[in-house]
Image (tube, rainbow, N blue to C red):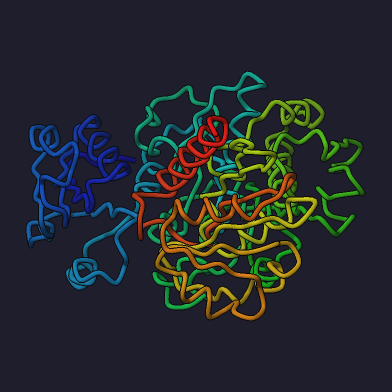
């Protein structure tokens, strides 16, 4: 329920904060926008200043005049302004929580989180629902912000949300009818006080559910199963190993009751995507959708950019863009998705992970690891003498070296295990740069 008498402080003029501000204005409320960046760094600053009271270049005590803060997921909860707000007793929520509070009652919310696979699984659920003729939206950590849609108006049947741990940190009532936790592996350890805190953040997705809701969980993950004992929602499990799980793998088939889907019919490659597909199909079961029809819809899904995306072939060498692989667990998924060892390009801005966690995987599935970016020396320290390595500081030269050392039939995969901010704006910019370089290499070889 929206209270127009409250004054909202928006911390961070990024996508979700701006969407929340305009939704507040649309509902007749008042929002004050604040950002640490200078005005010239905010693309829409001029328009925002016309529409709202704004401040740039720092957070002032004007924020303390607000009743509730909607905090951007990019702002750490140990930031000085957050600590100051807590001391003042300011109520703080995420844009996801605000959207939940104002959404129409007839919309069913499906929320997907996990260290890896969120975007693919949320997009697959959205695809299946669209194929079945449902009116639905895909939002959250993918595409447009939750509040960027007319969610306060009736008529949207299903709202599919990709949710990050940062977005779950400030929920107070958010209770999706179907909540999916795909996996938990070390990530964002530069943001949390250890792995246990990160896991607790992920488990928040189930916190306010009721027995009438559904929790879809990965049975093969000990980090999940050791934490799922107190969930109120009805639990549905998926697994590559346990044949008693409601969704499981039997040989080369995904099995749910009497329904079977061949893994060769999946348009997305790798065991991790088999798990993502199971989670999406269990969501359809929870929503009482026809599973046979849902399996048919899966076959027409297309993989998302920057997630084991086939780019091109140069002199018989295949290139794959997996720029979204920003942690070691996602790199492990990439390594095990190919039938034979690959040449893998790693490195970027470090997030505090222990790269030795994938030493065995690299030994088994990589011909050579080409490491670049700010994390290259830390990676070298983890793998020196254990994995064939090449250190190349320049991103393009790294790709060129991998091609020069390849033979026909090899695969070169960009799967960094790191964030992209050492050299790129985001993982999309890194992936698109990779694709541009591959296209340039192909052109050079054709003209030679």
Quarter of the N terminus within the rendering:
top left
Q: Position of residue 23 (x, y in %)?
A: 27, 34
Q: Residue furthest front?
A: 448
Q: Position of residue 214 (x, y in %)?
A: 65, 48
Q: Position of residue 222 (x, y in %)?
A: 71, 70
Point 91% across, 37% down: residue: 258
Left of 410 or right of it: where is 188?
left
Is residue 364 positioned above or below 279 on the image?
Answer: below
Point 57% across, 31% down: residue: 446
Point 61% across, 35% down: residue: 312
Q: Looking at this view, is 273 or 434 the one in front?
A: 434
Residue 122 location, quadrant: top right
Q: Position of residue 44 (x, y in %)?
A: 18, 36
Is residue 222 positioned above or below 120 on the image?
Answer: below
Residue 3 location, quadrant: top left
Q: Looking at this view, is 313 or 422 the one in front?
A: 313
Quarter of the C terminus within the rendering:
top right
């Amino acid at each position: 329920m929206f209270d127009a008498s409250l004054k909202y402080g928006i911390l961070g003029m990024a996508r979700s904060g701006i969407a929340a501000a305009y939704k507040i204005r649309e509902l007749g409320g008042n929002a004050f926008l604040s950002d640490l960046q200078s005005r010239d760094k905010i693309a829409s600053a001029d328009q925002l200043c016309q529409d709202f009271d704004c401040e740039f270049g720092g957070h002032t005590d004007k924020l303390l005049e607000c009743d509730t803060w909607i905090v951007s997921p990019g702002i750490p909860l140990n930031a000085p302004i957050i600590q100051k707000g807590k001391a003042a007793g300011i109520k703080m929520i995420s844009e996801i929580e605000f959207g939940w509070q104002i959404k129409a009652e007839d919309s069913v919310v499906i929320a997907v989180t996990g260290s890896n696979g969120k975007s693919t699984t949320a997009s697959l659920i959205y695809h299946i629902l669209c194929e079945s003729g449902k009116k639905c939206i895909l939002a959250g950590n993918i595409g447009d912000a939750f509040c960027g849609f007319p969610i306060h108006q009736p008529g949207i049947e299903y709202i599919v949300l990709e949710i990050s741990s940062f977005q779950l940190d400030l929920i107070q009532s958010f209770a999706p009818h179907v909540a999916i936790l795909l996996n938990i592996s070390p990530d964002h350890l530069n943001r949390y006080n250890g792995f246990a805190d990160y896991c607790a953040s992920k488990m928040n997705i189930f916190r306010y559910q009721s027995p009438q809701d559904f929790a879809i969980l990965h049975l093969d993950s000990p980090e999940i199963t050791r934490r799922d004992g107190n969930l109120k929602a009805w639990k549905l499990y998926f697994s590559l190993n346990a044949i008693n799980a409601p969704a499981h793998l039997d040989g080369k088939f995904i099995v749910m009751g009497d329904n079977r889907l061949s893994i060769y019919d999946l348009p997305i490659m790798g065991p991790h995507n088999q798990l993502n597909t199971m989670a999406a199909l269990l969501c359809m079961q929870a929503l009482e959708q026809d599973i046979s029809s849902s399996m048919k819809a899966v076959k027409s899904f297309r993989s998302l950019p920057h997630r084991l995306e086939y780019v091109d072939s140069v002199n018989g060498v295949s290139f794959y863009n997996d720029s979204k692989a920003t942690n070691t667990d996602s790199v492990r998924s990439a390594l095990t998705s190919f039938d034979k060892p690959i040449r893998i390009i790693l490195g970027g801005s470090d997030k505090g992970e222990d790269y030795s966690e994938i030493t065995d995987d690299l030994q088994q599935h990589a011909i050579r690891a080409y490491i670049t970016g700010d994390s290259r020396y830390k990676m070298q320290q983890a793998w020196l003498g254990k994995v064939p390595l090449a250190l190349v500081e320049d991103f393009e030269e790294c790709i060129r070296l991998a091609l020069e050392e390849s033979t026909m039939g090899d695969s070169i995969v960009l799967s960094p295990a790191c964030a992209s901010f050492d050299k790129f704006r985001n993982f999309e910019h890194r992936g698109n740069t990779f694709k541009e370089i591959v296209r340039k290499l192909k052109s050079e070889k054709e003209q030679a």
